[in-house]
Image (cartoon, grey):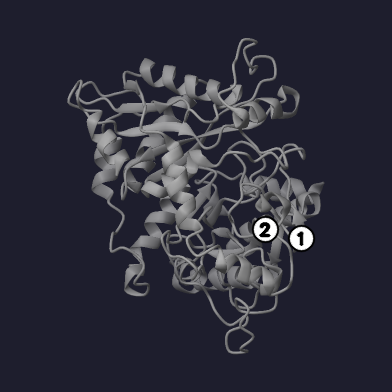
Amino acid sequence: MQIFQESWEITASRKDQIPTHTAVEFVQAYCKTAAIAQQINNCLHEIMFDKALNTAQELDKYRKETGSVKGPLHGLPISLKDQFHVEGYDTTMGYVGWVGTYEDDRNPTKVHKVNSQSVEELLSLGAVLYCKTSLPQTLLLGETVNNIIGTTLNPLRRSWHGYRWLCPDPGKLLWNPLRNVADLFGSTQNPGQDTYASSVGVMGTTIDAVKLVMSSILSTEPWLRDPGVIRMPWNFEMEKSTIARAKPDGSANQDLPFKFGVFWTDGVVGPQPLIRRGLRLLHDLLKSKGHKVVDWNPPSQSTAKEVHAAFLKADGAHDVQKQLQLSGEPLVPLLRNSFQLHYWNSTASEDGQIVDAVIMSVAPYAAVIPGKFYHPAYTECINLMDYSVAVIPVTKADKSIDLFDNDYTPLNEKDKRNRKSYDPEIYDGAPVGLQIVARKHEEEKVWANAKIVDSALKTMG
């Protein structure tokens, strides 16, 4: 208990307190909490504590000798999903056949000898990599289950899945300050189809931490080393001009309030009550802060879902089958089974102002109950359009108020299953996250919008 308390005090440190700790103290605290997390919830693929502590020692030595830090991420512990290559460790992507190999290549000059480009950038900035977390087999699933370590559940309640549970919402157990993740539907190696390039995302316990890592990585000019990266430094002017349109409490500056669209339902599977309440909460809050809020009713998402699925399966899922055949492992059970542009621009027709960002569900449910991941379309449509997205925690489920109306009529059989799977008792206390969506190449704008919405939420107490 004492070990945990000491580690908790360090991992919960405010930004102004961090300089009082050495890199070794900071990294050691996160290694300890990650070790506890692994024992409780089976969430790690690779434990890199020894290497992390050695790196931290080198960083402390560098700071002592030079009087300066190695980079903007000096001593910052970061975990990775197990799809990034880190020298000395396996990278599996959730495939048994990749264990002990370099993507099934047994060439000794490659196995455990390669860093992914993102890893090189992070290390050059002074970051400390201390573990790699579990992920779904193939990455094409919202539940963390593979044939290597089995299932990872949610730390808040083990009846939920815990896809990225090492980084919970702010105010809870801060196992990890930042996670560098390549998200669902994007993989580091997927030669079978390249319609969707890998997209690396950052998770953190604060909005500012996310910006720090994203802007720092872009400051290294990664496009000079990876031709797949667009030559776009962090646009501080876009960030600044977006932030300037709101006051510190998130309320609108009178000259140009934000115009937010709210996407209530895709018309296929409606959000469960806790998600609907989260949407309503933001709708009412942003209106009270002086912003414009309109309903967002784009063309049917079923079209986007069909196009998305067609791209993913264009090669008959050849790459997925190839990786599974390496070991003979089966698919996990759950895996067995321009129109938007025109609409976005049309939102200026009434008042001359185009919607700045859209607020919508990440999924029609909060934390996924194992075996009940029915409907990924709320993110599939965003992947198809290659939009910029930030996800923030908005509220928590409350079993006393998050209830379906007795007269609710399901939209179809899938929506009926979604309603049937909802249990207020099981979901009670679940964090409700919503996504804020901006257009392509507007990461700075969507980050700024997320910061403004987060600031508005904090005024609620």
Of the image marks 2 and 1, the number of the one nearer the N terminus: 2
Image side of residue 356 versus residue 44, left or right:
left
Q: What element carries label 1?
A: loop
How many residues crowd mark 2 within 10 Å: few (<14), some (14–19), many (20+)?
A: many
- Where residue 17 sits in the image (x, y, percent)? 54, 47
Residue lying farthest to the left in this orientation: 352
Which quadrant holds residue 101?
Answer: bottom right
- Where residue 406 sits in the image (x, y, percent)? 65, 10
Residue 134: mark in rendering: 2
Q: For the point 47% across and 30% down, which residue is it?
A: 266
- Where residue 339 sits in the image (x, y, percent)? 30, 40
Instruction: Give how far apart the Cα atoms at labels 2 and 1 are.
Output: 8 Å
How many residues crowd mark 1 within 10 Å: few (<14), some (14–19), many (20+)?
A: some
The residue at which mark 1 appears reads as: 149
**The one of 434 and 415 positioned closer to us in this rendering:** 415
Which quadrant holds residue 454?
Answer: top left
Residue lying farthest to the top in this orientation: 407
84 up-or-down from 175: above or below: below
Residue type (three-letter) at the residue carrying disc 1: Ile
Confirm whether residue 337 shows in the render.
yes
Residue type (three-letter) at the residue carrying disc 2: Ser
Q: For the point 51% across and 66% down, which residue is it?
A: 188
87 up-or-down from 144: above or below: below
Whether residues under marks 2 and 1 lie with C-beta atoms below 8 angstroms apart, the answer is yes
